[in-house]
Amino acid sequence: MRTKILRYIFISVGIFFGLAGLLVGGMSNSVLGFGNTPLGGAIITFDAPGAGTGPGQGTLVGVMDPTTGGTTITGFYLDAADVFHGYLRAPNGTITVFDAPGSGTGPFQGTQPASIAAETITGFYVDASDVAHGFLRAANGTITVFDAPGAGTGPGQGTYAGNINQVGMIAGFYVDASDVLHGFLRARDGTITVFDAPGAGTDPGQGTLSAFTDCLNPEGAISAEYFDASNVLHGSLRAADGTFTVFDAPGAGTGPGQGTGPNGINHRGTISGSYLDASNVFHGLLRAADGTITTYDLPGAGTGPYQGTFPQNINASGDIAGQYWDANDVSHGFSRTPDGTITMFDVPGAGTGPGEGTVGICNNSLDAITGFYIDANDVSHGFLRAAPRAYPTPRPRPIPPPRP
């Protein structure tokens, strides 16, 4: 079913819908050699050791490190007992699995990595009381856990870390004791600043949040979103100095659960995302740094409720990775270049029934794409699609110093 795909996207990267689906990480470490990096647009698939093989289980949500120039991937898997665990896949295919200390071991508890930069991973884990906490995993495997000030301690509440940039800043959101959402930015020294977008609602399930993976750029700008008092979603940009710009895509719906959802921002301030219209159909959006918004739809995208185009990440060159749902509720991956050229793809072995198919999640600087696919048995598997064309070696771009 579509809710299965949307649940994974929501938890890990997309966060476009309400919070009812939030899944509410001791340290273990094992390593397994598993393939290598494909070349020339080829697709390889992989499974984390220990991943479950039942419906709704398997290897999920691969995101790539944009700073290594390779294809280092992190994500999570759901085991046979429906517990989440983190994994790190090296460019040579070696997979390391890990759990954050304090992670719960009950169904839908455990560790969920969400973003990686400079070989450092952030994400969240859900403890035995179904409370979420942020974590930071250093390149040497050391894990630091943290909570945003004001985070609630009840089931489904807590701290959801979702983005890390090259200088070690972390962005995410927390759910307070009243089930209201608030954004946060954690500096490299551990200092946490909390914030709310202007116009954010204050009732349960409303407030400010950011999607996961690449919604924090190297300069410290955050592509965020908020639910207003009518439960309508709006896009926002929080600049590095803390000032907000709010925006809505033309054609975005104004009913509960509809609206505009940013899913990524690059160093130029270009934002990728989607909007849900008044008929509950998804469409892609691209917001330039000057505020100009371009909307688009994938050829073959369905026009029924919760079908359509769902872009995810945007890389430094402006290439976008994502997925679309067709008229049969099957998901397919795509890549969109800055000139608007679209390439669509399906992973071999992806199912062709409703709620099955290919889910493109993240692209690197060369437009290699990773994500997961759901097979005909409703089991998820990771994939890596190599860059489809040759690129010159990019010049290193200076990284701004950490903010005090």
Image (tube, helix red, strand yellow):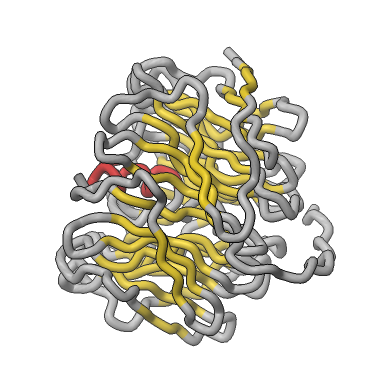
Up/down of 92 relative to 267, above or below:
above
Of 256 and 52, which appears nearest the observer? 52
Of 40 and 202, which appears nearest the observer? 40
Q: Is residue 198 visible?
A: no
Up/down of 343 relative to 387, above or below:
below
Question: Is residue 255 found left or right of 53 in the rendered image?
Answer: left
List x then y, in percent, for residue 299. 31, 75
Of 223 and 120, which appears nearest the observer? 120
Q: Give the residue drawn at x 62%, y 18%.
A: 30
Question: Is residue 223 found left or right of 301 in the rendered image?
Answer: right
Quarter that holds the N terminus? top left
List x then y, in percent, for residue 282. 28, 68
Q: Give the residue drawn at x 27%, y 61%.
A: 325
List x then y, in percent, for residue 247. 42, 76
Q: Is residue 196 visible?
A: yes
List x then y, in percent, for residue 341. 48, 80
Q: Give the residue drawn at x 46%, y 43%.
A: 61
Task: Kindly indicate the quadrant of the structure image that contains residue 279.
Answer: bottom left
Furthest-top residue in this view: 26
Question: Is residue 362 found left or right of 79 in the rendered image?
Answer: right
Q: How many marks?
A: 0
Q: Give the residue drawn at x 33%, y 76%.
A: 297
Task: Kindly indicate the quadrant of the structure image that contains residue 42.
Answer: bottom right
